[in-house]
Image (cartoon, helix red, strand yellow):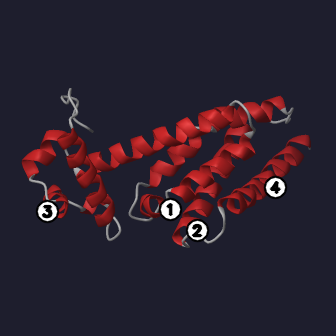
């Protein structure tokens, strides 16, 4: 958890945090955050431990701040799309954002990253997606919609992780279309199953 006693953020604090974040991501190329200790992180960032502890309790707190900043960026971008488009466009936008931050996302979505991060990001779209399903007249129970959303989220995460691990060779629009095709198959199957 990030310490809350910081009332004034000056340039030195911003630079310190930037060096710590960059160093953490660099170290996470080799190992998970929980295997990185404050001493190692401080040494890599060229910052003393007292300065580190002024801002954070642990390297995981640095990662949580990175994730929060990235989540806020994603939310801001998706909020713009939310009012004007459907759930397919939201996925397309998410894939574009991941692609635009390729180097960063390769680390964040790797086996050394936080496994819950992408799930939390995708789950932010749950309410609008389920709402669009309801508006379209899909004849499913709430429980079926919950199960379907869980299936789609976990499948999407697996595809996005594979995509980032393979250096995002496929353009973002194509990976979004693939996920949408697979998801549509799950939706169709659920509709057929509920009609029986």
Question: Residue beneath label 3, please?
Answer: 43
Mark closest to the chain's N terminus, 2 or 3: 3
Callout 3 touching callout 1 (CB < 8 Å): no
For mark 2, give the secondary structure: loop
For mark 1, give the secondary structure: helix
Which residue is painted at 7% across and 46% down in the image? 50
Q: Callout 2 environment at 10 Å: few (<14), some (14 to 19), or many (20+)? A: some
Question: Residue beneath label 4, please?
Answer: 185
Q: Residue furthest top?
A: 7
Which residue is painted at 75% across and 57% down in the image? 177
Mark 4 vs mark 1: in front: 1
Relative depth, front residue between 107 and 187: 107
Question: Residue beneath label 1, please?
Answer: 102
Alpha carbon separation for disc pair 2 and 3 = 32 Å
Which residue is painted at 73% across and 38% down in the image? 145
Mark closest to the chain's N terminus, 4 or 1: 1
Alpha carbon separation for disc pair 3 and 1 = 26 Å
Question: Residue beneath label 2, please?
Answer: 168
Task: Please state, as top left, top right, bottom left or bottom right, where the N terminus lies in the image.
Answer: top left
Alpha carbon separation for disc pair 4 and 3 = 50 Å
For mark 3, give the secondary structure: helix
Callout 1 touching callout 2 (CB < 8 Å): yes
Mark closest to the chain's N terminus, 4 or 3: 3
Q: Callout 3 environment at 10 Å: few (<14), some (14 to 19), or many (20+)? A: few
Where 24 falls versus 81 (above or below)?
below
């Amino acid at each position: 958890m990030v310490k809350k006693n910081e009332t004034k953020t000056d340039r030195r604090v911003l630079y310190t945090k930037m060096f710590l974040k960059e160093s953490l991501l660099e170290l996470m190329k080799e190992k998970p955050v929980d295997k990185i200790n404050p001493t190692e992180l401080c040494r890599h960032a060229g910052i003393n431990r007292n300065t580190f502890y002024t801002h954070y309790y642990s390297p995981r707190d640095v990662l949580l701040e990175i994730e929060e900043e990235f989540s806020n960026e994603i939310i801001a971008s998706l909020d713009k799309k939310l009012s004007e488009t459907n759930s397919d466009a939201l996925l397309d936008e998410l894939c574009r954002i991941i692609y635009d931050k390729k180097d960063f996302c390769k680390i964040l979505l790797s086996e050394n990253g936080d496994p819950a991060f992408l799930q939390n990001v995708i789950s932010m779209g749950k309410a609008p997606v389920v709402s669009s399903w309801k508006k379209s007249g899909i004849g499913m129970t709430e429980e079926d919609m919950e199960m379907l959303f869980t299936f789609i989220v976990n499948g999407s995460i697996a595809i996005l992780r594979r995509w980032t691990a393979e250096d995002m060779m496929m353009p973002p629009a194509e990976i979004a279309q693939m996920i949408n095709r697979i998801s549509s198959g799950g939706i169709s199957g659920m509709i057929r199953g509920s009609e029986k």
